[in-house]
């Protein structure tokens, strides 16, 4: 009797484990569309202007690299706004209200601060009369 009870209990446990292991996650449509970016995955575009040179271009802060940094891309035409700006690769928030736009080696190209509304204004180099206004 004792052996039969143990066998029945072992069978019940095995059946329960088999049932649990055979359950699948709910079906999810495997089709992924690149036409609509996921929330938060899209970059943030800026119109970058130099009022002295009377030039402008577009730049984009992209996906996060770390908790403080994100990718940054500016087109070749941005070199007419500020020399070397097309080489910018990172956007780093210093946590003190300043943001450093730097090249691939981490050398600062521009340091900007929050300006009016959705704008940033360059503070370093001191002679940079550059603003970044949200284009989104």
Image (tube, grey):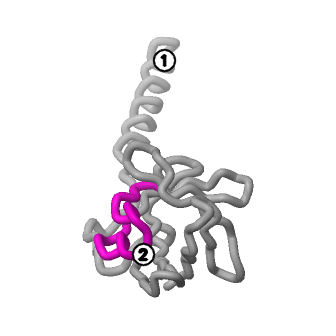
Q: Residue at x 46, y 87 (%)?
A: 54
In depth, the one of 90 and 57 nearer the eye is: 57
Q: How many numbered tags mark residues here?
A: 2
Task: Identify the element where label 1 is drawn.
Answer: helix
Q: Residue at x 25, y 70 (%)?
A: 31
Note whether residue 42 is visible: no
Relative vertical location of residue 92 with respect to residue 77 in this rendering, above or below:
above
Q: Residue at x 40, y 30 (%)?
A: 14
Note whether residue 110 is visible: yes
How would you rate the neighbour count of disc 2 (Cα within 10 Å): few for under 14, some for 14-19, many for 20 or more? many
Q: Is residue 55 magenta?
A: no
Task: Identify the element where label 2 is drawn.
Answer: loop
In depth, the one of 42 and 90 nearer the eye is: 90
- Choose mark 2 or mark 1, whichever is in front: 2
Q: Tell me where residue 110 appears, x and y as whole percent.
A: 53, 60
- Left or right side of 95 for 84: left
Q: Is residue 82 magenta?
A: yes
Instruction: Quickly name the residue at label 1.
Output: 6
Q: Earlier in the sequence, mark 2 or mark 1?
A: 1
Give the quarter of the image for residue 119. Answer: bottom right
Q: Residue at x 43, y 35 (%)?
A: 17
Instruction: Quickly name the residue at label 2.
Output: 81
Q: Which residues are magenta?
A: 74-90
- Left or right side of 94 for 29: left
């Amino acid at each position: 009797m004792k052996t039969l009870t143990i066998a029945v209990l072992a069978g019940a446990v095995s059946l329960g484990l088999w049932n649990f292991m055979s359950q699948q996650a709910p079906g999810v449509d495997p089709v992924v569309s690149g036409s609509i970016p996921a929330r938060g995955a899209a970059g943030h575009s800026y119109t970058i202007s130099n009022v002295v040179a009377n030039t402008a271009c577009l730049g984009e802060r992209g996906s996060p690299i770390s908790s403080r940094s994100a990718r940054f891309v500016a087109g070749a035409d941005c070199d007419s706004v500020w020399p070397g700006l097309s080489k910018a690769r990172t956007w780093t928030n210093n946590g003190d209200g300043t943001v450093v736009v730097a090249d691939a080696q981490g050398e600062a190209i521009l340091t900007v601060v929050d300006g009016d509304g959705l704008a940033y204004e360059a503070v370093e180099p001191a002679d940079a009369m550059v603003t970044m206004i949200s284009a989104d």
